[in-house]
Amino acid sequence: MAREECKTLLDALNKATACYHHLVLTIGGSADSQNLREELQNTRQKAQELAVAIRARLTAALRDHGLGAEERSEFERLWVAFSGCLDLLEVDMRRALALGTAFPLHASRLPLVRTGVAGVAARALSSRSLRHKADRDFEVADLRDLEREILQVGEMIHDMEMKVNVPRWTVQAREEAGAELLASTGASSAGGVSVEEHTGPCDPSKALAATVFSAVLLAAVALVVCVAKLS
C-alpha cells in the first residue's frame, strides 16, 4: 500500500516538475506576465509539498530493516527517481531566479501622478500606481522566497543522502537503456525483411524483357506521332 502511494505521489511530482520546467522557459519571453509569475510560484510550492510527503514515506520504508529484498529494490528505484526529480527541480528553480532577476516585470519608474492633475484622471493614475507598487512588491518578495526555497531543496537533497544511503549506480533498472527505442527499431527492421522476402530478389531475364518491351512501346508511340504530323 505504501509503495503504491509513493508511486502516485511521485507521478504527481513528475508532472509538477515538468510543468514548472515548461513555465520557467517562458520567463522573459512574449508570454511573460504577472499571471505567469504567480503560476510559477504555485507550481513550485506544490512540487515542494509533494517532495516533502514523498521523502517522509520513502525514508521510513527504506529504514525499515524488516523490508523484503524485492520490496527494498522497488523502493530504491523510487528513491533514485525521486532524487532525479529533486535535482531537476533545483536546477529549474535556480534558472527561474536568474531569469526573474534579469527580466523584471515591473521596473522602477517615476511617479505617474504629477502636480496639477486632478479629478478622475488623478484617481485613475493613483490607482494604477498603487497596483504597480503591489505587483512590484509581489515580484520582489517572490524572488526572495525563491532564493530561500532553493536553499531548502538543496538541504533536502543533502539530508536524504545522509539518512538513506542508496547510491544511484547500485540500483538496477527493470529494462535496459533504450529498450523502447530498440523495440521500435526491431519492429521496423522486421517489416523490411518481410517485404524483401515477399517480393524476392530481382530476376535478370525479367528485367531484360521489361526493358525490351519499354523500348518497343516508345518506338510505336514515336511512329504514331510522325504519322499524325505527316497527315
Image (tube, rainbow, N blue to C red):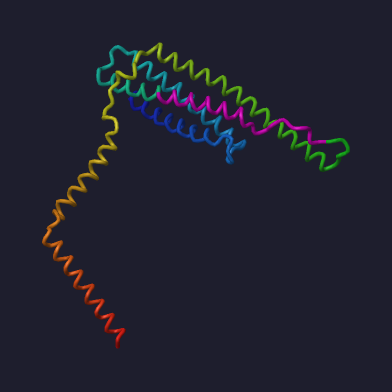
Q: What x and y, as percent, mark residue 23? A: 52, 35
Q: Is residue 177 above or below residue 214?
A: above
Please state which of residues 162 and 215 is positioned toward the viewer in this rendering. Answer: 215
Q: Is residue 45 above or below residue 126?
A: above
Q: What x and y, as percent, mark residue 65? A: 30, 11
> Residue most toward the left?
205
Answer with left or right where residue 203 lies relative to residue 148.
Answer: left
Q: Residue at x 64, y 29 (%)?
A: 139
Q: Residue at x 25, y 39 (%)?
A: 183
Q: Any magenta on residue 14? A: no
User: Looking at the magenta stretch, what is its main secondary structure?
Assistant: helix
Q: How many numbered marks have been drawn onto this rendered protein structure?
A: 0
Q: Is residue 166 above or below residue 141?
A: above
Please state which of residues 192 and 163 is positioned toward the viewer in this rendering. Answer: 192
Please state which of residues 16 and 116 is positioned toward the viewer in this rendering. Answer: 116
> Quarter of the image containing the N terminus?
top left
> Residue most toward the bottom?
231
Magenta residue span: 84-113
> Quarter of the image containing the C terminus?
bottom left
Q: What x and y, as percent, mark residue 76? A: 32, 20
Q: What x and y, as percent, mark residue 213? A: 17, 69
Which image quadrant for residue 115? Answer: top right
Q: In this view, does 64 lie above or below 132?
A: above
Which image quadrant for residue 73? Answer: top left
Q: Any magenta on residue 96? A: yes
Which image quadrant for residue 229? Answer: bottom left
Answer with left or right where residue 206 lies relative to residue 107.
Answer: left
